Image (cartoon, grey):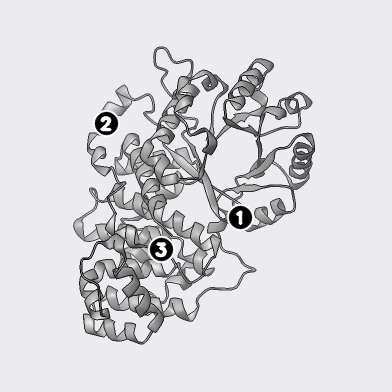
Amino acid sequence: MFKFATAFARRDATDRHDALEEAPRPEESAAESPLAHRFLTRQPILDPGNRIIGYELGVRGDVPLPVLPGASDEANIGDEYLITCVADLDFRRALGNRLVLLSLSTGTLDNPLLDTLARERTLLALQADELTPRIAERVAALADAGFIFVFDNYSGDIDQIGFLQHFEYARLDVTRLDALNLSHLALHLRNAGQVRLIAGNVENEEALDACRQLPFHLFQGHHFTQLRPAAPHKLDSNRMRVMDLLNMVMKHAELPKIEAAFKQDAALSIRLLRFMNSPALGIRHEIQSIGHALMMLGHDNLYRWLTFLLFSGDQGDARTLALFRTALTRARLLEILGQERLSPDQRGGLFLVGVLSILDALLNVPMAQALANLRLPQAVVSVLQANAGPYAPYLALARACERFDQDTVARWADQLGIPPDEINLAHVNALIWSESLEL
């Protein structure tokens, strides 16, 4: 069962949104920040069981970047920003034992900021075609000091493979290789050294199935957020009951009527009472009845809790947990970015849009069918079904942040008038918040 108490009781514990007020405004960013047009992006890393075991974070892109005096090149400036984000203590605490993968330039290997990283949980990816004997010596020294390296985008060059001995991981980009070349390079890497293989940019189930036939250990990408045509639908009776309750709460039905509906489902009633009596909520007196619990929660928090329950129908389902973790991060990012820009009556829908934006993948049905049993505000339906309405730019921006799509992030950020520094800080805060929740 998911444990959501911290989502309500400690909502702001790791949220440093107040710092956004100090973020440079657009004109200041352009003049002062070396990352004036760079946006933080992320991509999950999953094990064979679809459990999220880490993230790649990046600020790379094709946008020109001014070089500050004393910096060797643009790539090093971006690397320094990235390392600073990862070294943040709140960030490290929230991620716990999850891995963080950073793609760095070889020039950053001499940067003292590397010493701020949690070496046992940080993977440093270096492009195979940038390796030289001198760089290999530096990699070997850092590996002896506890750093973990990823041999990235091997092309098959015989000179490159000689450096593999210093690397614990190797990664191949699935989108750059056809099936024959992917198979050839994966087998070549496995036979050449004792490395764990990462399949990069696995974006659909077909690509995942192909990679599973090869000796890959980890899979990076958003394949788990896509519909699975061969898998069964998940519109089961438990979720339908939750949807019925959601509809009652959305219409602000009287609490006695909602209580009566709860009492028809003993399992749901028990879960509500357990949740309300969780120590993390800090309620001094034990909740003894469903009516008391509903009164304490109120319609808004009850709606949010019921939305969470949509994801708890598959006990032990790692894919559902990965979907939910992604949805929570997306929802919190939307909420942070939009709360000062949308009207008060629209702000409440931001979190809802983020969570429900992967409902189609959860239920494994088209979005229109997934929403058919929910009576949602038209603005929420419009963005989820047609990418239209006031929430659409925020959802598009959040999705782009998940896909290393710098151009799309920049386009929506410009349209919304949100400076890059604010988006990057909000992204980090959203990830910290979602990872701090016990699911």
Checking the image for residue 204, the label placed there is 1
- Residue at image point 52% right, 33% down: 119
Q: Is residue 117 left or right of residue 157?
A: left
Q: CA distance from mark 1 to mark 3?
A: 20 Å
Task: Indicate the amino acid at tag 2.
Answer: Pro
Rendered-image quadrant of the C terminus: bottom left
Q: Which residue is mark 2?
A: 24
Q: Earlier in the sequence, mark 2 or mark 1?
A: 2
Which percent across, then down, holds residue 113? 45, 24
Numbered label tally: 3
Task: Indicate the amino acid at tag 1.
Answer: Asn
Q: Earlier in the sequence, mark 1 or mark 3?
A: 1
Q: Is residue 375 visible?
A: no
Q: Element at badge 3?
A: helix
Q: Nearer the viewer, residue 422 or 16?
A: 16
CB atoms at circles 3 and 2 under 8 Å apart? Answer: no
Crowding at dot 2, Cα within 10 Å, few <14 / some 14-19 / many 20+, comes out as some
Q: CA distance from mark 3 to mark 2?
A: 32 Å
Q: Element at badge 2?
A: loop
Please determine whether, in this image, residue 127 is positioned above or below residue 226: above
Which percent across, then down, holds residue 430? 36, 48
CB atoms at circles 2 and 1 under 8 Å apart? Answer: no
Q: Nearer the viewer, residue 288 or 99?
A: 288
Task: Indicate the amino acid at tag 3.
Answer: Leu
Q: Nearer the viewer, residue 410 or 425?
A: 425
Q: Is residue 39 left or right of residue 28?
A: right
Checking the image for residue 356, the label placed there is 3
